[in-house]
Image: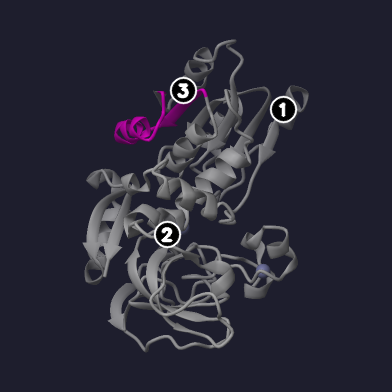
Amino acid sequence: MKALVYHGPGQKSWESIPDPKLQEPTDVIVSVDTTTICGTDLHILKGDVPAVTDGRVLGHEAVGTVAETGSAVGSLSAGDRVLVPAITSCGRCAYCKRAMPSHCQATGGIGWIFGHLIDGVQAELARVPFAETSLHKVPDGVTDAEVLFLADILPTGFEVGVRNGGVKPGDVVAVVGAGPVGLAAIMTARLAGASQIIAVDVSDSRLEFAKQFGADTTVRAGDDAAAQIIAQTSDGLGVDVAIEAVGLPVTFDTAVALVRPGGTVANIGVHGAPVTLHIEELWIKNITITTGLVDGTTIPTLLQLVASHRIDATKFGTHEFKLGEILAAYDVFAAAGEHNALKVVIRR
Ligand SMILES: [Zn+2]
Ligand SMILES: [Zn+2]
């Protein structure tokens, strides 16, 4: 088969490698129909994720068709259309049992294994461990492009942003960073009943996307962004929930500055550097700060919402490529700003 293979920092190629084989009775082999590229793949290519070694097939988001099933797999059969989520779940370890497969202990202590600890899904075929507890059947009548972004960004925005932030009907929500995950938080904050959603970003084109995804107002990031946002709240005290979706000290500081006494800062951003936590100011304001890695446990809910057309996840896919053009897809995604790109849809 052909696959996108990582060969160390800055090195990748679309090349022929042996087809994956069933290794455990709980495995299935999925024929990949549609996949995409994540910001995490770009971090891997910069060398930021040393657990990813030379020869690894990248990718952790796909929709495909079951090609082959292990002997212990009873509820999936060849021909089933499935969503392959970023997080694998054994269904049996202590973390999976507490609905936290992000820390599944059966797969190396982390639920994110595709394109990380085992070969990923930017390939014609992929081996999926713990298939029955990890894969989601795609409802009839739902297209690949409608569910592809439920593999990672939509549950990330929903679980780590909206749900951890405790967004409830009537809340005023600020989302700092209007990249794909920030937009997913905006889209799902609306579902959770937010009365007002304010997006903050440095890029005017991303703020335009934010409006299309449900932001009521937008603020250009800068020195007085926090003051501008606080001024938009009815009592001038700040927002109920500030969702950080970038992962830089400055954007974390912005999120903390926006939140009202008693409010919540929900961090989604992947941070690579320490931030200063001003506990001396926060303790007396009853501020809650949450963090987390996506579990994917809301994917069944999101699938229902897609099937009933309550959310249109196709909006994330701004550019389309054939699987054999994946290197061009990487070039566009890596320069997303220049191309006005959010996510790429890569089809067999
Ligand atoms: Zn991802
Ligand atoms: Zn587990």
Q: Is residue 149 above or below residue 213?
A: below
Q: Residues within 10 Å of mark 1 (few under 14, many from 20)?
A: some
Task: Name the residue beneath numbered marker 2.
Answer: 139
Q: Residue furthest right?
A: 284
Q: Amino acid at mark 1?
A: Leu
User: Does residue 199 show up magenta in the picture?
Assistant: yes
Regarding residue 196, the answer to whether it shows in the image is yes
Q: What number is the disc on residue 156?
A: none
Q: In screen coordinates, is 32 left or right of 288?
A: left
Q: Is residue 14 above or below residue 180?
A: below
Q: Residue furthest front?
A: 140
Number of the front mark, 3 or 2: 2
Number of the front mark, 2 or 1: 2
Occupied quadrant, residue 46: bottom left
Q: What number is the disc on residue 282?
A: 1
Q: Are marks 3 and 2 in contact (CB under 8 Å)?
A: no
Q: Secondary structure at mark 3?
A: loop
Q: Quick one: label 3 or label 2, which is nearer the N terminus? A: 2
Task: Name the residue beneath numbered marker 3.
Answer: 223
Give the residue drawn at x 36%, y 53%: 146
Q: Is residue 334 above or below residue 11?
A: above
User: Does residue 182 show up magenta in the picture?
Assistant: no
Give the residue drawn at x 62%, y 60%: 102
